[in-house]
Amino acid sequence: MVWQEQRLAQTHVVSKDSAIAGIARPHADEGDDDDDDDDDNSDNELPGAYAMNLTRVQETPQDSTNDAVEWDPTEPISSADEHRRARPRGSRAFNADEESVDDSPNYIDANVEVNNTITRRRWPLLLAVALIWLGAFGAIVGVLMSGGGGKIEPADVDSQPEDDRDAVLTRDECYLPSDIIDSDPFLQCKCGHQIVLTNSKVEAIYNDLRGIYSEQLEDDMTFVSCDMENIALAWAALNSFTAKEAGETVSATNTENRFFLSLLYASWGGDEWRNTENWLRDGVTECDWYGVGCDDDGKITSLSLPGNNLQGELGTHFGLLEDLKALDLRFNDLSGSIPSEALSRLTHLEDLSLGVNFLTGTFPTSYVPSSNLKKFSIFGNFISGKIPSLSGWSNLVELNLNRTNLSGSIPNEWGSLSRLEILDMEIMRYLNGKLPPSFGTWTSLKMLNLNHTAVSGTIPESIGNLVTLETLKAGYSLLSGSIPSSVGNLTNLVTFDVEQGDLSGTIPSELARCTGLKVFNVRNNEKMTGTLPVELEELEDLESLDIWLTGINGTVPSGICDHGHGKEVVTTNIESPGCACCKLSSNGADLVPP
């Protein structure tokens, strides 16, 4: 059996780009120029699932050009153009120059004459349309009659030339039922037919598989139905039979893997994927399908399909791949909730990445991962509800909840996450409260991102326990108080960024012990005072020291520019003409000294 990996391209199946182009408003009528200004801003919106990397094309009135308009994903969505209007037509003439209506008898007579001329010229067109309909009806009757009284006969593939024989089995176009009996079930259902597999051996394999996986299948599913589960099961049975007939060695693991993967293909709109290399292709092991990884025993251990235009519900079928260690489905159009029961089946899972989809519902709190789970990333989804306590997640290394709608404060129970290295909670609009008392137990933490949140309170003195910390970002938060002197213990610190907070007090001289520090940013913390510690001259790797719009005054230590190039100090109150690396600002306008 020969397949092409490309999706079916019929006139009734359109791409996103063509769909966008097709949602342009119609041309305005001639002489309707005064309505153009009103309609220029009226256009149809696309569903939010298409908001990534698309442009919306508007069709402009005649004698105009088409402009591509960048689509802002935050723009409100409208399902219809409420401003589209057409001028009513009648026997009254509209004078575009004088903006008046001409009701003169001369005009009315002329209009009637024009209408009579149009009527005389219309009948040949009507006759041609009628003949076309009659021809189409005759063709349909001929096809039905050629079927032998309604009996569908398989196509005589062997009697066709080689090129034509391949064409019968491609997914590039649809065929009559008689042409695709015993062929790819995906193709049969794509063409709008039921599944017809006449080979008894294929049916026997089908029944065996159905008995094994009865829990994953609908009870009322029939052999001919085009349900997603049945398509996948029929394809797996046909593929197993075809492979054995070709002399291939097909193990039970191969058949199981291909059934599970074909089920995911059907569930996630496989015909629309950007890359389907080797998927559902005869003669190619499933371990060579795009995005599929296997171990030496042929077990599927990874499925990586980021940015591949997966669509539909996330569902539970991925939980059938019980040997998975890594599942990466980022940047797709998957929807629905995250199913705890499916995750619980993946006892070997180490890395789960579901970022930037359209997932909704609450956090899967009933899911308790095995000790293998290291990374859990669901950023950029619409997951809501209370921030979970994550009891039993003690081996977690990376947690990314960035841009989700989870609410509340960081639970004190997170102190058990002693192996946590990356915690990203940026732009969590409903994250609030103080840092938990257990904050200092994250002794393995390397990156903490609390930018654009409502986290409040002071920076705990226990921050000095986070000796592996490299990046601290809490800009545009509500953190207040002074920077604790224990920050000097963070000898691995590279970035300290608390821009536009509510910090006060002075910059501690102990900061100079952070010898790897490159960026120190406390811009727009107006309550900060004091002078720049002279010890900062010891920071040889410092590239940016941003104290713009703070109350820090005095002079810039003369040796702060001695180490390397590319450093700049941004300030409002400090004037240091001898500072070669200083970038002075006054009232927001940058003044670079000579």
Image (spheres, helix red, strand yellow):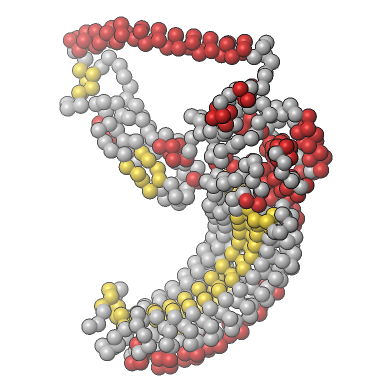
Quadrant of residue 106 within the rendered picture: top left
Rendered residue at 53%/52% (across/down):
307
Residue appearing at x 56%, y 73% in the figure:
448
Q: Position of residue 120 (x, y in %)?
A: 30, 6
What residue is shown at x 22% (from left), y 8% (from top)? 109
Residue 161 in the image, given as x and y percentages of width and height: 56, 26
Give the answer, above or below, for where 172 lies relative to 116.
below
Total numbered badges shown on the rendered structure: 0
When the figure is inspected, residue 168 is found, relative to residue 18, above or below; the finding is above
Residue 77 rendering spot, x and y as whole percentages: 47, 44
Q: Nearer the viewer, residue 294 or 355?
A: 294
Q: Look at the image and tell me in which quarter the C terminus lies.
A: bottom left
Q: Is 333 situated left or right of 541 in this image?
A: right
Regarding residue 90, the answer to whether it shows in the image is yes
User: Quadrant where the N terminus lies?
Assistant: top right
Residue 131 place in picture, x, y as percent: 44, 9
Q: Which residue lies at the image location 27% right of the left edge and 8% below the top edge?
A: 117
Q: Is any atom of residue 413 visible in this view?
A: no
Q: Nearer the viewer, residue 548 or 159?
A: 159
